[in-house]
Image (cartoon, rainbow, N blue to C red):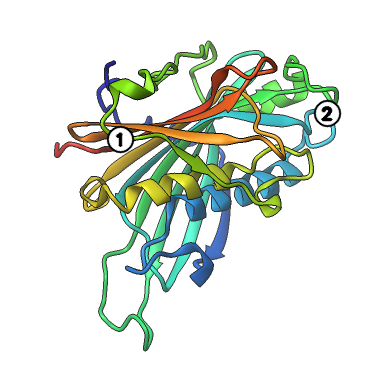
Amino acid sequence: MTAPQAYRPLEDRKPGADFYSAGYRVRTGDIDQDMRVRLDGIARYLQDVANDNIAVLPFADTDPFWIIRRTVIDVLEPITWPSELRMERWCGALSTRWTNMRVRITAEGGTNRFNPEPRPDGLVETEAFWINMTESGTPARISDLAMETLTAMTDEHRLRWKAMNPATPPAAEALELPDREHVLRITDFDPFKHLNNAAYFEAVEDELVHHADLIDGPHRAIIEYLRPITPGTRVTIRRQRLDGTLLIWFVIPDDAGEPQVAASVSVASIPAP
């Protein structure tokens, strides 16, 4: 078993390219005991800005259905509470059926009586691989109107899928850390009966309590969704620590009861430049 590929910074926005911008505020439900915005909080911000962005795009009616295949979150400077956020969203690359949508989150930190010490402003860079879908749930060609809108934002028009995480975990008996069951709640699911993107990162945060060194400085979290998790599914968490990387697999039973991976996650320290 090998760790994910070496760290490469996410591509910056094309000079002069259009982008969507929105402001948000950090709420206490998204922070940990150190006032840091958790990964599941960032995932919720990304869902909100995507929904708000799609609603005002010219192709909101022709291309309304998208599913996410991967999210990359680079926490370069943690966002803390209290903070005001500015989120900028644009297309970083695309092909005829999918896109890489970039979101930059900048935070203007503040203080209050609960967190009176000044802290650095936050910076998080993210990228998500989105697949255009039909209403029945099959991949679909991006409409001409959407292609016209998105291609103007980027010069990368031949986007291909390449996994960034190991999709297959080692056998449980080969690992030092034992498997554990992850209990799902009905509030973890969206209206389509799929586990919400942020709910995956809640399980990841449970693991990071024991690997705090990985998030003490800049770090990258990558999640790749392989199969949907629906209500009533039993989820087992398998994990492996490889030096500066924590690997996590969400394992569920297939129709025959055999284990299969629903999602893979890596959290790794970002090396100093």
Q: Secondary structure at mark 1?
A: loop
Q: Can residue 203 be seen in this snapshot? A: yes
Disc 2 vs disc 1: Cβ atoms closer than 8 Å?
no
Nearer to the camera, 270 or 33: 33
Residue 71 picture location, percent across and down: 49, 34
Q: Residue at x 75, y 23 (%)?
A: 133
Does 235 sit left or right of 122 as displayed? right
Kind of residue at badge 1 = Leu
Q: Earlier in the sequence, mark 2 or mark 1?
A: 2
Q: Residue at x 50, y 55 (%)?
A: 41
Residue 252 disc label: none
**Is residue 82 positioned above or below 43 on the image?**
below
Which residue position holds label 2? 62
Which residue position holds label 1? 177
Q: Residue at x 17, y 36 (%)?
A: 271
**Is residue 101 positioned above or below 116 on the image?**
above
Does 272 sit left or right of 200 as displayed? left
Kind of residue at badge 2 = Thr
Q: Secondary structure at mark 2?
A: loop
Residue 190 picture location, percent across and down: 72, 45
Quadrant assignment, res 62: top right
Does 169 sit left or right of 132 as displayed? left
Instruction: State the residue lying farthest toward the bottom.
Output: 113
Does 117 sit left or right of 273 as displayed? right
**Is residue 188 positioned above or below 57 on the image?**
below
